[in-house]
Image (cartoon, grey):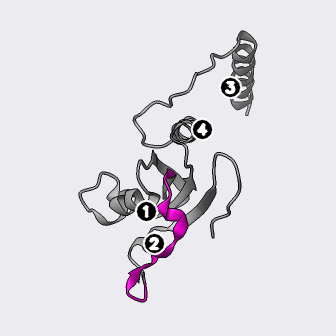
Amino acid sequence: MAIKRKGIVTGYARMWPREIFDAKEGKTLLARTLPFLKEKGVYILYRDEHPYYIGKSADSLFKRLRAHAIRPQARYYNFWNMFSAFAVPDKEGRDELEGILIAAMPTVNSSKPKLIKMKFPSQVSALVKKIRAEKVKAALTK
């Protein structure tokens, strides 16, 4: 279940199955019974264990994720089977967390993170070139 704490993220769910948007608990949709999903936040859709798409909800996580889960015309409908979600009440916090996740993980997101990108210092560029040269040399000597 979600863990609550103080800070930018007030709770999260990790690698939950998409099926919670189909399953019922009594007459109520299982996902609707989970208080954590009533909050605004940032989410990751996974294709198996691989991050596929990162997004945020202006409304509740439940509404946004359910739209991805039950509408066949939704852009990512066929491409995910699990999700992680982070409850972030503050809009600026949601924007920043979404940007961090997009910058950190390869996904199909076409948007660019709204973060200041750091350029490679010359020392890092030199190191990368050295490492690549060593790998090429090692491959050629095999």
The residue labelled by disc 3 is: 136
Q: Nearer the viewer, residue 44 or 105?
A: 44
The span shown in magenta is: 25-41
Relative vertical location of residue 57 with respect to residue 102 in this rendering, above or below: below
> What is the secondary structure assignment of the residue under circle 4?
helix
The residue at the far top in this view is: 122
Q: Nearer the viewer, residue 35 or 12?
A: 35
- Density class for disc 1 (Cα within 10 Å; few <14, some 14-19, many ≥20) is many
Q: Is residue 26 magenta?
A: yes
The residue labelled by disc 4 is: 104
Q: Amino acid at mark 3?
A: Val
Q: Is residue 51 magenta?
A: no
The residue labelled by disc 2 is: 31
> What is the secondary structure assignment of the residue under circle 3?
helix
Residue drawn at x 54%, y 56% as measured from the top left: 85
Q: CA distance from mark 3 to mark 1?
A: 49 Å
Q: Earlier in the sequence, mark 1 or mark 2?
A: 2
Q: Are marks 1 and 2 in contact (CB under 8 Å)?
A: yes
Q: CA distance from mark 2 to mark 4?
A: 28 Å
Q: Nearer the viewer, residue 87 or 99?
A: 87
Relative vertical location of residue 42 with respect to residue 72 in this rendering, above or below: above
Q: Amino acid at mark 4?
A: Ala
Q: CA distance from mark 3 to mark 2?
A: 51 Å
Q: Number of callouts in the render?
A: 4
Q: Measured from the top left, where is residue 2 in percent x and y? A: 63, 65
Q: Amino acid at mark 1?
A: Phe
